[in-house]
Image (cartoon, helix red, strand yellow):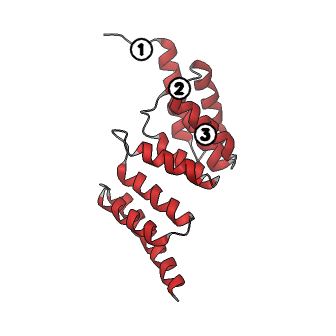
Amino acid sequence: MKIMGANTNTYSKFLFQAMDAYPYNLEETIESLNYAISYDENNALALGLLARVYAEQLHQYKRAIQLYNRALKVNLHEVSLYPHFVNALLWNEDWEQAQKLINFALKIKGVDKGLMHLKQALLFEYKQQYKKALRWAEKARELSFNDSQINHIDSEIKRIKRKINKFKK
């Protein structure tokens, strides 16, 4: 059995500090991420969290997309990256790339299928294809297995239905 070395333990410490601080303490998040990445510049989790900072906080979607691509080159099976990567693509209005990523992610073992179906619904909503969005959101509800996520999806479904009703009039 191999015991993790000092570098791995130190790296993990900084990565966990960054994960714990995000999004409430951005200064600590960035400082801890800088340390973590200095120990392992190709860690998918660290790169993914840095991508989230660029997308969610700085609205620098192109930079975030570059970081997500780099992270997935390191580890295609880091399932936590896919929903956030899709968000960055949606915010950057890269519909075709978002569709490709959703299709790919749905084939990855361990990816939250309910959440990815919800991302598909959001893509259709962004494209103003509300009936398709509603079908995908309802499928997302079927594939979700925790109350918090189901409640969130229910609110998404209500919003989509309001849009459908608005355009019927």
**Tag 2, which secondary structure?**
loop
Residue in view at x 33 percent, y 38 percent? 109
Foreground disc of the pair 1, 3 = 3
Which numbered marker is on residue 43?
A: 2
Secondary structure of residue under mark 3: helix
Give the residue number, with chain letter if any, for mark 1: 4
Q: Nearer the viewer, residue 144 or 17?
A: 144
Q: Residue visible at 59% across and 49% down? A: 89
Q: Estimate the x, y position of residue 13 in percent, counting from the top left.
A: 50, 26
* Sequence-first disc among 1 and 3: 1
Type of amino acid under label 3: Ala
- Where's residue 16, x and y in %? 50, 32
Q: How crowded is the residue under tag 3: few (<14 C-alpha within 10 Å), some, or many (20+)? A: many
The image quadrant of residue 146 is bottom left
Horizontal side of residue 91 vs 16, given as left or right: right
Contact check, label 1 and label 3, Cβ < 8 Å: no
Three-letter code for the amino acid on which mark 2 is drawn: Asn
Mark 1, other Cα within 10 Å: few <14 / some 14–19 / many ≥20: few
Amino acid type assigned to the residue bearing label 1 in the image: Met
Determine which residue is flagged by label 3.
Answer: 51
Q: Marks 1 and 3, how far apart in space?
A: 27 Å
Task: Identify the mark nearer the N-term, 1 or 2.
Answer: 1
Which sits in the foreground, 49 or 167? Answer: 167
Give 111 or 52, whichever is nearer the viewer: 111
Q: Which numbered disc, 1 or 2, marks the residue closer to the eye?
A: 2
Mark 2: few/some/many CA within 10 Å (<14, 14-19, 20+) = some
Residues at marks 1 and 2 touching, judged by CB atoms closer than 8 Å: no
